[in-house]
Amino acid sequence: MNLTFALIELGGGAFFVIAGWLAFRRGRLPFLELASAAAFGLLLEQGNQILFETYEYSPEFVLAIDRAPVVIGLTWALIIAGAMRITDALGVRRRYAPFVDSVLAIMLDLAFDAVAIRMGLWTWREIGPTDGWFGVPAGNFYAWLFVTAAFSLLTRWLREPALRRPMLAWLQLLVPLPAFALLFLSIMAFSFLVPIVDDVPGGGLVIFWICLAAFSAVSAWAIWGPDRVAPNADAVRIVDLRLAFAIRIAIHLVFLVALLALGLAVSEPVLLLVALALLLAEVPLGALARRRHALRSPA
């Protein structure tokens, strides 16, 4: 048994159990949202590997459902749920929230994906360590935006009717299916454009940067513009605000330690700068979320 993999699985599992227990205490809907997010994470990992065959996970993972390590699905749930909680605490309107959720999620992946492949957690096929973003294809980052946006859009759309008619909350368990369909369509659009725009291994960074700029512009308007609402969703929050940030900091620190241990601070200093910048960005983000959330209720 690989100790690094075991620790990652135990740590991710522990965070998920804590989040699941707290969600269950808050009610049926928060628990179902977290459970469906985990199911979505496993579905997209299994589906993407079967349909696109662009990457594969290490066999060192102890618990896996066919090609998808269980901890990856659980981590997807924690990342998406945490992003949604932070967005709600910032007072973002529902129509803008999926954009903010997606930016919050990609802030994590930009910090760790290039490190993760050097740890051997997963392997991208037909791409070298200098292709794409330090060995990570642009399509991965592009997909992260739409993974989060698809799940957030459908989950937030279902929340209000589920609060009015509690039995509708069970429909949340079906959300992974249409969310994956939306993700699939977005990936097909990317696959169509890449040969035209940037036909190289791991190419398409320009498409990703354009999408990220658009998502970020909408997010900036949603967070700092005048069209905001009072921080809300306490009754249906999937995870506690403090737990959401604890999970994000833990992810940053795990891969920052790995980055330093692998000597990437010397061989790939840009990765260190990006990792540190995104970790430090959590400080003002957390302060803003807590300040706005305090206007409504204690964190």
Image (cartoon, rainbow, N blue to C red):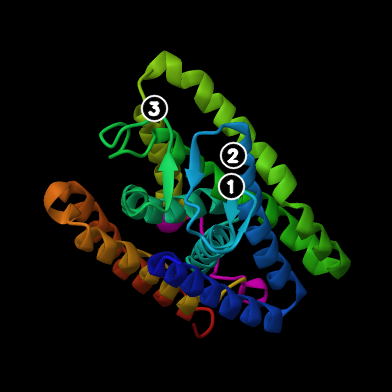
Residue name at image x 43 percent, y 64 percent: 5
Q: Amino acid at mark 2?
A: Asn
Q: Amino acid at mark 1?
A: Glu
- Work out whether residue 162 or residue 107 is closer to the camera in this orientation and state it: 107
The numbered mark, 1 or 3, whose residue comes first in the sequence reads: 1
- Element type at marker 2? helix
Instruction: Residue lying at the far top in this picture: please name it.
Output: 196
- Name the side, left or right, on which 24 lies relative to 204: right
The numbered mark, 2 or 3, whose residue comes first in the sequence reads: 2
In the image, residue 188 lies at what x, y percent? 58, 26
- The answer to which image quadrant residue 233 occupies is bottom right
- Name the side, left or right, on which 219 lies relative to 49: left
Pointer 2 local density, CA inside 10 Å: few below 14, some 14–19, many at least 20: some
- Element type at marker 3? loop
Find the magenta span and give its range.
223-237
- In reply to whether residue 120 is colored magenta, the answer given is no
Residue name at image x 54 percent, y 70 percent: 231
In the image, residue 6 lies at what x, y percent? 46, 69
Image height of 18 relative to 202, above or below: below
Which residue corresponds to mark 2? 48
Residue 244, visible in the rendered structure:
no
Which residue corresponds to mark 3? 204
Residue name at image x 76 percent, y 59 percent: 172
In the image, residue 105 lies at what x, y percent? 45, 54
- Name the side, left or right, on which 218 lies relative to 69: left
CB-based contact (under 8 Å), mark 1 and mark 2: yes
CA gap between label 1 and label 3 equals: 21 Å
CA gap between label 2 and label 3 equals: 18 Å
Which residue corresponds to mark 1? 45
Image height of 205 relative to 265, above or below: above
Instruction: Residue lying at the far front in this picture: please name it.
Output: 1
Pointer 1 local density, CA inside 10 Å: few below 14, some 14–19, many at least 20: many
